[in-house]
Image (cartoon, rainbow, N blue to C red):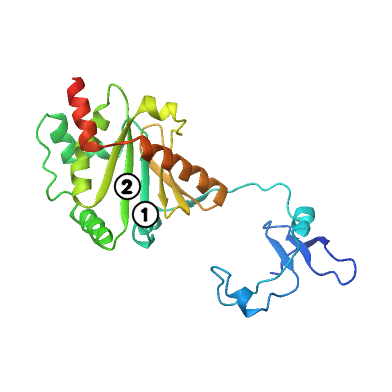
Amino acid sequence: MARRLRFNGTGSDEDGCPSVHEDVDSGEIIVHGPQLTDPDDIAQLQRLSPGETPIVVPRELLVDFGPKEVTRVPKIIDLDAFGRLFTSFEHTAWRLETRGRYASDEGTTTYAQFTRGEPVAWEGVSPDWCARRREQSALGKRFERVRIVDNPATTGQLYLLDNAKRNSAVGEDIRNLWRSDAIRLHLPAEDFWIFDSRLVALLNFDDADNLIDVELIKEPERVLRYAQVRDAAWHHAVPFKQFAAQLTAKE
């Protein structure tokens, strides 16, 4: 079916080029103008795919005739797609954990051991997950987390503090931050992963602390916001062994 296109405007009164059209059904924008042909210019373009044609338009054209109001539709990905992010990233995967509990933890054997006051047998737990972490870490990739802890710490947070032994053994750098410091630093009460400082996976939970879906964020302005959160949290967070020692000293 052919698109229904609306002509928004042109930057030229003579030949109508460059111009902006809008798909009235999808909201997509179509821009046409002079083709960029200089090989040296084209060589500077990033992520230019086969079949794509770079064109040149004056900035004023987009200001005058581009969409003025854009309704952002969240891009929700399934857990399989989310899982693939942990092998497709190139350099860093960084996580902020802000919740008092995670329902997925509470059904595990290790959580039952912990709540009974027994030493948790982390050896051999989640072998496939551990193998993938070790493989990626061996490639020089970094996995880092900051976990927020209340005062007093919840059972779920204390469990994750013990869990950090396993995560660090497979290559993750785990640190902790008191909730009061997170509030002072204006950190958001959001859980997310940020990959290579260019995309964010925002984790959405229901009222029962179950992960319900993952929103993929690529807009540079939003990604920058989460990168700033990461930098502030990482600067003030304490390595988990040191944090656990502080917690023990307070008891």
The extreme right residue here reads 14
- Secondary structure at numbered mark 1: strand
Label 1 amino acid? Thr
Q: Quadrant of the N terminus?
A: bottom right
Q: Is residue 185 above or below residue 109?
A: above
Residue 241 quadrant: top left
Q: Residue at x 61, y 47 (%)?
A: 72
Q: For label 1, count other residues whose C-alpha is less than 10 Å away and answer few (under 14), some (14-19) or many (20+).
A: some
Of residue 113 and residue 87, the one placed in the foreground of this image is 87
Label 2 amino acid? Glu
- Secondary structure at numbered mark 2: strand
Q: Label 1: which residue? A: 92
Q: CA distance from mark 2 to mark 1?
A: 8 Å
Residue 181 quadrant: top left
First of labels 2, 1 by sequence position? 1
Q: Residue at x 67, y 58 (%)?
A: 26
Of residue 139 and residue 39, the one placed in the foreground of this image is 39
Give the x, y percent position of residue 197: 45, 52
Residue 144 — which label? 2
Asked whether the residues under the numbered discs 2 and 1 touch, taking CB atoms below 8 Å apart as contact, a structural biologist would say: yes
